[in-house]
Amino acid sequence: MGDTAIFWLVGVLFLAFYCDNWPTKFSRSVNVFLRTVINLAIGAAVYIVYYKTAHLFLGTQKCFSHPQQFPMIPTIWLINIFLINM
């Protein structure tokens, strides 16, 4: 669950920090729905890219959700880069 939350958090912080919490021109409920869908898409993209390339850097098996790949650590480093730039 922590890994899933971290992948989702990347999308949330990206929209909040770099896109000024876009979209904001619709009603509140529509904005929340669109941001949720966009955040899920960003989180899924980060998940897929991470698990497609992590084995090259970590020396583990190539597969999804391998317990030795520890996605929280490098993803938190990415979040730290977001925070440093803010």
Image (spheres, rainbow, N blue to C red):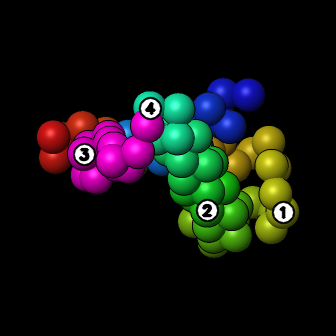
Question: In the rendered image, is residue 41 in sight?
Answer: yes
Position in image of residue 55 (x %, y %): 69, 65
Per the model, the C-alpha gap separating discs 4 and 1 is 39 Å
Part of the protein shown in magenta: 14-27
**Mark 3 vs mark 1: in front:** 3
Q: Residue furthest top?
A: 2
Question: In the rendered image, is residue 72 in sight?
Answer: no
Q: Earlier in the sequence, mark 3 or mark 2?
A: 3
Q: Earlier in the sequence, mark 2 or mark 1?
A: 2
Q: Amino acid at mark 2?
A: Ala
**Mark 4 vs mark 3: in front:** 4
Q: Amino acid at mark 1?
A: Cys
Q: Secondary structure at mark 4?
A: helix
Q: Amino acid at mark 3?
A: Asp
> In the rendering, which numbered label is found on residue 63?
1
- Residue depicted at 66% across the width and 28% down the height: 2
Q: Is residue 75 left or right of residue 33?
A: left
Crowd rating for badge 4 (residues with CA inside 10 Å; few <14, some 14–19, many 20+) = few
Q: In this figure, which residue is indicated by the disc labeled 4?
A: 28
Per the model, the C-alpha gap separating discs 2 and 4 is 25 Å
Q: Nearer the viewer, residue 62 or 47?
A: 47
Per the model, the C-alpha gap separating discs 4 and 3 is 15 Å
Q: Earlier in the sequence, mark 3 or mark 1?
A: 3
Q: In this figure, which residue is indicated by the disc labeled 3?
A: 20
Crowd rating for badge 2 (residues with CA inside 10 Å; few <14, some 14–19, many 20+) = some
Per the model, the C-alpha gap separating discs 3 and 1 is 35 Å
Position in image of residue 34 (x %, y %): 54, 47
**Mark 2 vs mark 4: in front:** 4
> In the rendering, which numbered label is found on residue 45?
2
Look at the image and say whether residue 25 sits in the magenta stretch.
Answer: yes
Q: Amino acid at mark 4?
A: Arg
